[in-house]
Image (tube, grey):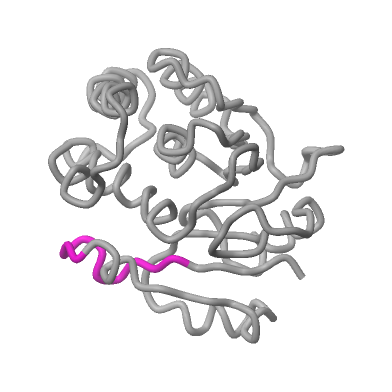
Amino acid sequence: MDIILKYFDDFSEKQLGQLQQLEALYKEWNEKINVISRKDIDALYEKHVLHSLAIAAMCGFDKGTQVVDIGTGGGFPGIPLAIYFPEVEFLLTDSIGKKIKVVQEVAAAIGLQNVTAVHSRVEEIKGRTFDYAVSRAVAPLAELWNWINAAIRKGQKSDEFPNGLICLKGGDLTKEINESGLKKVVQAWSVHDIFPEPFFEEKFLIYVPKL
């Protein structure tokens, strides 16, 4: 938790309590269902929670904003973002049912009222539109955009960015961005510039506006 408080000082008591519960909950669930790598579970707050909150550090969502998390896995970045933005609605999706079960149980245990988790590929969700999509290291940028572009509605529900896709990625992204067909509109920031910790040296935040 200390590393979270190093960079954020605006949590309410309720939010702090929710964040503090995450470690025990994920350790308990990880013993039953491996949703976080064994080597990372002891660094949950840095490698998963703080990493997810890089999105919150760069982009504030307005009250009532609707956000979809593509391939949430164990609930990242969706769960930390839902804690940070209690007045924003989050739909967390994943194609692996046991991971969604963990997300549902964790959200219920900490009293998150603004999270719905569904066992589905995001491209198979029909009749829903969103203001923003978020994702963490799920698929190449071209695939992410192909899956979600049609479901993002035009508009701007943030002071910082028009509606669009915000994703967390690692490594050299030059080739991936070039091959995405989105090079002219993509914006990228180093997460290490936001949180100067060694773990984030090759981590990036990518934004694509709704076209």
Q: Nearer the viewer, residue 57 or 38?
A: 57
The boundaries of the magenta stretch are 196-205
* Residue at left offset 30%, top offset 20%: 25
Task: Tell me where residue 208 appears, x and y as whole percent.
Answer: 62, 69
* Residue at left offset 57%, top offset 43%: 69
Task: Tell me where residue 96 appears, x and y as whole percent.
Answer: 57, 32
Say above or below: 206 vs 42: below
Q: Is residue 183 left or right of residue 211?
A: left
Q: Is residue 120 left or right of residue 161?
A: right
The image quarter in which residue 120 lies: top right
Q: Is residue 21 left or right of residue 75?
A: left
Q: Nearer the viewer, residue 25 or 9?
A: 9
Task: Tell me where residue 111 appears, x and y as whole percent.
Answer: 44, 15
Quarter of the N terminus within the rendering: top left
Q: Nearer the viewer, residue 100 or 10?
A: 10
* Residue at left offset 19%, top offset 43%: 5
